[in-house]
């Protein structure tokens, strides 16, 4: 038994959410929900990981027709949080995780400009973006055929479309609460819809939904506020935030801690309870002059609980894993060191939890981890 990791097995609470340890299953697209409906094998997949403090599901489409479709990580079997069949499927997932002693949150995910038009459950719905543009094409390593499909400019989202999106997030958050989910997670990172409004490269608007750094947070703030009104005040809202984008892995929403404080402070004021800070390497310094990671800066600036994610358990980041051999590594001593330094409160695990449902058990027992296996993305082990 590894006792040097005891701090990561301490309980955590935020509002009505009480966790038995500090490990969180990070959301990962699975594509195993035909017609948007998660089936029994999806419930079993999440239940097998219920020994983690919290399970955050793969991205789930809120109640908006253009929320999901084909894209860089999406496909024809992405789940939604609307409709009788899908909600019944999610109820079975929640019940299975609770029966296994776990806690679970859905990640509501609107793909925005990343979605390919003409795909998804509502192919007739046009994809949504703040300014009708996908982003810079000279800074990405995404497949050429995908880039060719999203290159043509579209129409900027109208006020009416934006209002529909906000209302759709709120409705689906309300549905998730009624199903018994323990928290609500919002995907506000990686160049998807909420992030595309935050990023100056994709938001060229000069109206109420664009402008300077603070004004660009408006859509995210309004979604958070609407979700907060749709669920109990003590049920936590988790917000995924990143600097990097699928359009540009080197992108930065905030060049300085002060700019980061503007963004995260506005989101915290709107009602975010926990920040899910997505980085490619959890221990990468966020700003010059300090070795503190991005999660640490968000925690310092907002005072809110924060989870870190990125490269824990492997020697390569996620994107590199798709192109280069990736080996399992035990870098948990550095996780514990930064946790003790109050950089973060929770530790999100992605690929390692995907590869091995018993990863937490192996951590506790000091056993070696499974190697990275691309074929795991095509299974629900």
Image (tube, rainbow, N blue to C red):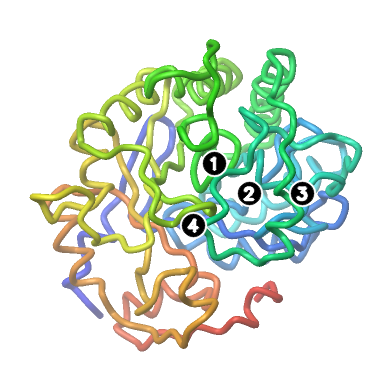
Q: Is residue 368 left or right of residue 121?
A: left
Say which quadrant the N terminus sits in.
bottom left
The answer for how far apart the CA atoms under marks 1 and 4 are is 22 Å
Q: Which mark is residue 116?
A: 3
Q: Which residue is mark 2?
A: 59
Mark 3 surroundings: few (<14), some (14-19) or many (≥20) residues within 10 A: many
Mark 2 or mark 3: which is in front? 3
Which mark is first along the chain, 3 or 4?
3
Contact, CB < 8 Å: mark 4 with mark 3? no
Which mark is first along the chain, 3 or 2?
2
- The x and y percentages for residue 232 are 53, 21
Contact, CB < 8 Å: mark 3 with mark 1? no
Which mark is first along the chain, 1 or 3?
3
Helix, strand or loop under label 2: strand
The answer for how far apart the CA atoms under marks 3 and 1 are is 18 Å
Mark 2 or mark 4: which is in front? 4
Is residue 336 depicted above or below 245 in this figure? below
Say which quadrant the C terminus sits in.
bottom right
**Picture quadrant of residue 7:** bottom left
Is residue 60 depicted above or below 263 in this figure? below
């Amino acid at each position: 038994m590894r006792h040097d990791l005891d701090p990561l097995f301490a309980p955590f609470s935020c509002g009505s959410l009480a966790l038995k340890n500090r490990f969180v299953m990070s959301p990962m697209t699975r594509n195993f929900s035909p017609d948007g409906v998660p089936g029994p094998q999806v419930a079993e997949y999440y239940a097998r990981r219920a020994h983690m403090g919290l399970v955050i599901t793969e991205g789930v489409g809120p109640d908006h027709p253009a929320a999901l479709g084909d894209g860089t990580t999406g496909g024809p079997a992405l789940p939604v949080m609307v409709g009788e069949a899908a909600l019944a499927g999610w109820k079975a997932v929640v019940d299975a995780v609770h029966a296994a002693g776990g806690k679970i949150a859905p990640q509501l995910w609107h793909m925005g400009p990343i979605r390919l038009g003409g795909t998804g459950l509502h192919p007739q719905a046009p994809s949504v973006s703040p300014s009708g543009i996908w982003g810079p094409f000279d800074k990405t390593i995404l497949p050429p055929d995908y880039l060719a499909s999203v290159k043509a400019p579209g129409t900027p989202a109208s006020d009416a479309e934006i209002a529909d999106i906000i209302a759709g997030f709120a409705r689906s958050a309300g549905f998730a609460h009624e199903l018994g989910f323990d928290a609500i997670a919002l995907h506000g990172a990686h160049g998807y819809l909420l992030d595309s409004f935050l990023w100056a490269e994709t938001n060229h608007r000069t109206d109420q939904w664009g402008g300077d750094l603070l004004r660009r947070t408006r859509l995210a703030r309004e979604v958070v506020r609407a979700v907060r009104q749709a669920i109990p005040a003590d049920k936590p809202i988790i917000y995924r935030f990143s600097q990097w984008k699928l359009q540009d892995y080197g992108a930065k929403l905030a060049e300085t801690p002060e700019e980061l404080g503007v963004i995260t402070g506005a989101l915290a004021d709107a009602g975010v309870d926990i920040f899910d800070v997505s980085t490619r390497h959890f221990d990468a310094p966020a700003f010059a002059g300090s070795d503190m990671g991005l999660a640490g800066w968000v925690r310092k600036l907002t005072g809110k609980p924060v989870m870190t994610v990125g490269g824990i358990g492997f020697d390569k980041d996620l994107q590199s894993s798709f192109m280069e051999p990736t080996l399992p590594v035990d870098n948990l001593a550095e996780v514990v060191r930064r946790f003790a330094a109050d950089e973060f409160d929770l530790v999100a695990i992605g690929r390692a939890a995907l590869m091995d449902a018993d990863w937490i058990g192996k951590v506790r027992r000091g056993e070696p981890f499974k190697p990275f296996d691309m074929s795991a993305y095509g299974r629900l082990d």
